[in-house]
Amino acid sequence: EMCIRDRLQTEHTQLQSDCDHLKEEIESMIKENEKLREDVESYKNTISKLNEEIEGYKEKNEQLVNEMEDYKETSADLREELKSYTSKESSNAEEHKKANEELKAQLSEYPCTLRC
């Protein structure tokens, strides 16, 4: 009977030790789990902030694309204006050339004394 009691006592002590060890492991896992939850929350907040920044960049990019389209339209308008101006200048140059030729022809009709 003594032997059985000692053996039961030894097993009980071993089980108690195992139980204490498992309890410590569980508490450690609970702490680690809590830390991981905090990390997840922190990452969620970071992701949320980054998404807001991305939205801001998307809006800015859209604004810049619209401005670029406006500049393209303005540039096309200015090219057309320049073509028109160049065409008018070319036409004016021809008119001036004809007018100068006519003046020279008229001048050649006058005697040299009037021209000199």
Image (tube, grey):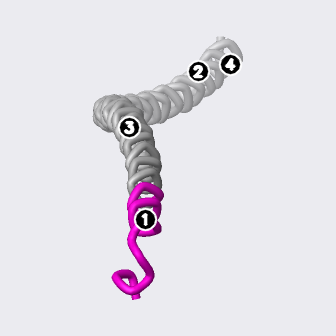
**Local crowd size for mark 4, using a 10 Å CA cut-off: few (<14), some (14–19), many (≥20):** few
Residue type at the position of mark 4: Arg
* Badge number at residue 109: 1
* Secondary structure category for the residue under label 1: helix
Residue at x-position 64% and y-position 25%: 10
| Relative depth, front residue between 37 and 94 | 94
Where is residue 45 shown, x and y percent of the image? 30, 34
Where is residue 26 shown, x and y percent of the image? 48, 26
* Secondary structure category for the residue under label 4: helix
**Where does the N terminus fall, quadrant-wise?**
top right
Q: Which residue is mark 2?
A: 15
Where is residue 78 shown, x and y percent of the image? 36, 41
* Badge number at residue 7: 4
In three-dimensional space, the C-alpha distance between marks 1 and 3, rounded to whole angstroms, equals 38 Å
Range of magenta residues:
101-116
In three-dimensional space, the C-alpha distance between marks 2 and 1, rounded to whole angstroms, equals 137 Å
Mark 2 in CB contact with mark 1 (< 8 angstroms) = no
**Is label 4 or label 1 in front?**
1
Q: Which residue is mark 3?
A: 84
Quadrant of the image occupied by residue 102: bottom left
